[in-house]
Image (cartoon, rainbow, N blue to C red):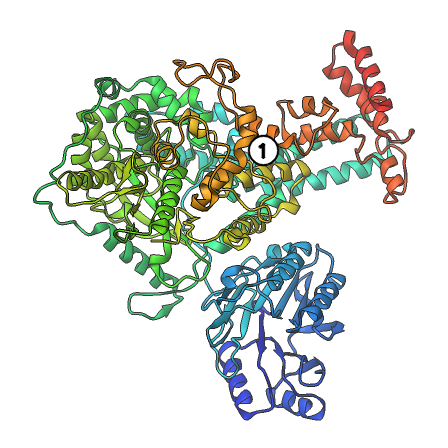
Amino acid sequence: MISNLKIFSWNCQGCASKNFIRAFREYNAEYHPDIVCLLEPRVSGKKANYIIEQLGFNFSHRVEAVGFSGSIWVGWKDSVRIQILQNHPQFILLHVNDYVPNNSFFITFVYGSADMSKRKILWDGLKFAMPHQSTPWILMGDFNAILAPEDKRSTCNMGKRYSLFGNFVDSCELQDLGFRSPTFIWQRGGTSVRLDHALANDAWMTSFPQCLVSNLPCIKSDHRPILLSTRTNMDLAQGRPFRFLAGWTKHNNFSTFVKEKWNYGGNMADSLNNFTSHVKDWNKNVYGFLGSRKRQLLRSLNNIQKALYHTDSSFLAKQEMEVRDELENVLNHEELLWRQKARCDWLHLGDRNTKFFHSCTIKRRKFNRIIDLRISNGEWCSNQDILRAEAARFFENLYGEVPQDLEEFPNVRFPSSKPSDITFLEKKITYDDIKRALFDMAPLKAPGSDGFHAHFFQSQWDILGNGICKWVKGVFTGQPIEQDLNNMLIVLIPKKECLGDFSEFRPMSLWSVMYKLITKVIANRFKLVFPNIISQEQTGFIAGRNVSDNIILAQEVIHSMRCKRNGKNWMAIKLDLEKAYGRVSWDFISASLEAVGVPEFLRKAIMSAISSSSMQILWNDVPTHKFKPARGIRQGCPLLRYMFVLCMDWLGHLIRADIDIGRWKLIQLSISGPAISHLFFADDLEVQNLGFYLGVPLLHSRVTKSTFSFVVEKIRHKLNSWNARKLSIAGKVTLAQSVLLFIPNYFMQSMLIPKGVCAEIERLIGFGLASKSSALWVRVLRAKYGWKVQIPDSINRSQCSHLRRSLAKVWPLLRENLISAIGDGASVRCWKDPWIPGAFSIGSAFWTLKEDTWSSRDNNWKNIWRYQGPQRVRFFLWLAFKQKLLTNSERMRRGIGQSNSCALCGNEIEDMVHVLRDCPTAKDMWMHVIPSQLMQRIVESLGRASLD
């Protein structure tokens, strides 16, 4: 039995030369593959037999070439048992038997034709040969197609070469296994492409979660070979930190256990450590291992049902119901466990999506797993101990470098804060402030070094609340935060799939809930006062401002610069501060807080929390040694956005000071409009780079479908990263809704998307003109295009930016449905404008625009979808209303069932009315939930519904 099967695939582009034999032997000696596939050998007949003997295969099989094109050779060792299932001019389907006990898998080696019409035959052939989804299946080889835009570096368009391959992968429910080492497999001239892929179905991912694909060095051919290993050589993580399980809170005795074991004596870290030791024992002795409990209950249920088959026993029937209830409870706990591990915050509990969560967890772990990297001496290293030490050294140098003392701070003054804001900040921290901050936290976000989620404190607030409030108030009166609670774990999130060194990670901090509670209480206060402190050029992280505002301004600046015919030339500069959050001086933060008038007790609490922290890198789930930072704010801290925005505002005030003395020139987009000197967004500064700004293209040429192709790719990538096929229909609805919220939509708020890219737009940007008249972007557009209140109906298109044309296109629809709020009456046309005191609703605008293309005379469905219950219940009601429930009679009608009788009572035809009303089980359910005086009405209503 082979513990780690290695599969090698190479488009060698000819096997007849001695150079090929030499190159293959080098690969074989270095990587020791068990199964080898050679593509395009360009040799057949006796000569092919001779070469195969020279290569040293114990067994082999081949598809002969057609002329000089095609041909696939497969060879394998005698330790592998392989059965050839299908030959095709462009692929071979194999079955690998008994690789692991009671398990086998299918493998398809592919050599796709360079002719697109022949590749269509390949996709159809592979779909026809596709094994059942429950059996692991992997496809490897040269597909002569790419899966994503980043798979090709060239000026040529991808065209259908990508779309047909992508459609095949989606229809067969396959996943790209990714790769390590260089991205591109084939290179010629100025074109580099990844044509060779390894694809697998979900069953393969479950069976071989540690599999790894490597792109090997190129020796003879201009194609790199790819090597798949079913297991990595990396040791499994040991010494993983404690993690609280959300399922514990669902146990009947957990609250009683917390009451008995929780004891707060003034030191929160000691209280949590003591409780941790108790809850570990409770988990082992009371809660138990879910997998073992589930298997035991399934065995018990099977034995009881076998006994009931032979004898009618009320005792056994009662036992069966009790075991079923307990099994249902265990399955719910199992779902919660995998949901916690999958980190799918967009999907709420309701349906049992254990398989979906399990698959998401596997994919997340595979993406985050770090196999090898280039270390400080420039060499590649895969030794985990060395990599762990290098990671700690890199970030210790980044965060531990003591910045030079500033001889003097910038000589600028912040605007005076409002007295009401200062009074608000000076208020004492209350019980309600602390509770609100805690319950604002996401319950199952990744925990800090103590291992507790916010869900624990939220669910047990009645027991823990008084102690938590006492501790938080103590911190704000000068009590230091215990070191165990102020130790952060740094998780390294890869920015891309193929990593080079440590700078290509996004460091995210995992804080203890108690630390986040302190900072979130402060952040909740800053949220209300910072809009009055931070200048309008900063739109990121400030309540009431939209990041798309600066995108609109950047678009208009670029448009005006492009249209200028005379005078000075203009240049736009984009500054991106590298590791900006991690390099901020603590002294500068303190000075910034003092400059805007933040009260002393808040300043001391902030600086104590920031400067007393320690850090550990969580490397493949194993923490490194602790070290102390000397600067910076860590991502994940609730205060980060406010501290950094405040520090960046110093630069804005410096620029304005230079403007006052004539050293800095502004750009004027119109004679009477406001001038612009700079735009801020977090760690980016736009100082009047063409290209992309906050993910949105800065347009300086004609807008085409290809301009926004990246939008489609973002959505496709996100959908492929989730396993929607494992969700119920209700879950898929939730997924579709979450995609629209999750994908960055700055571009949708600042320009009209071409019809070929997006058939309809859910968010429109025209409504802000009336409600945000003081916003900088509104004032710029009004002055540049001569608007007063309303957008003119006619425009000179040759002199307008893409944004202006987008607004003009949607304005007629918006104008017909705008309703005026009176306000002070200055902008209301009494005889023409409709009045209403309400607020704008994106939902109402969407349906108003949709009414032109679709309307329904039947409003009953609205009542169904307005029901405030789980998504799956709403979907069930909708199916029942449409009479589309998949009952046994409906199965028979569709030709997919063998009997139309009821599975529960066995006496009647199982149609919708029988399931919902007439079945004895349904009647018993109605009697338990409906008062007897309403029962007759319910029965009649269900009967009428079926007739309708």
Say if residue 507 shows up in the picture.
no
User: Quadrant location of residue 113?
Assistant: bottom right
Disc 1 target residue: 349
On the image, the x and y values in percent for residue 721 come to: 55, 50
User: Disc 1 marks which amino acid?
Assistant: Leu
Q: Position of residue 498 (x, y in %)?
A: 44, 62
Residue 628: percent from the left, percent from the top? 23, 47
Q: Determine the residue positioned at 61% across, 86% down.
A: 56
The quadrant in which residue 296 appears is top right
Vertical placement of residue 123 versus 520, above or below: below
* Residue ranking furthest to the top: 933
- The reply to whether residue 327 is in sight is yes
Residue plotted at (37% across, 57% down):
504
| Depicted 363 relative to depicted 556: above or below | below
Residue 10 or residue 137, whichever sits in front: 10
User: How many numbered markers are drawn?
Assistant: 1
Horizontal side of 159 relative to 181 (left or right) equals: right
Viewport quadrant of the C terminus: top right
Residue drawn at x 91%, y 31% as measured from the top left: 909
| Residue placed most toward the observer, 879 or 81 | 879
Q: Nearer the viewer, residue 929 or 718?
A: 718
Vertical order, 496 against 457 (above or below)? below
For mark 1, does the 10 Å Cα neighbourhood hold few (<14), some (14 to 19), or many (20 or more) residues? some
Quarter of the N terminus within the rendering: bottom right
Residue 2 screen position, x and y as percent: 60, 70
Secondary structure of the residue carrying numbered label 1: loop
Q: Is residue 479 left or right of residue 870?
A: left
- Lateral position of residue 49 relative to residue 803, left or right: right
In the image, 783: left or right of 649?
right
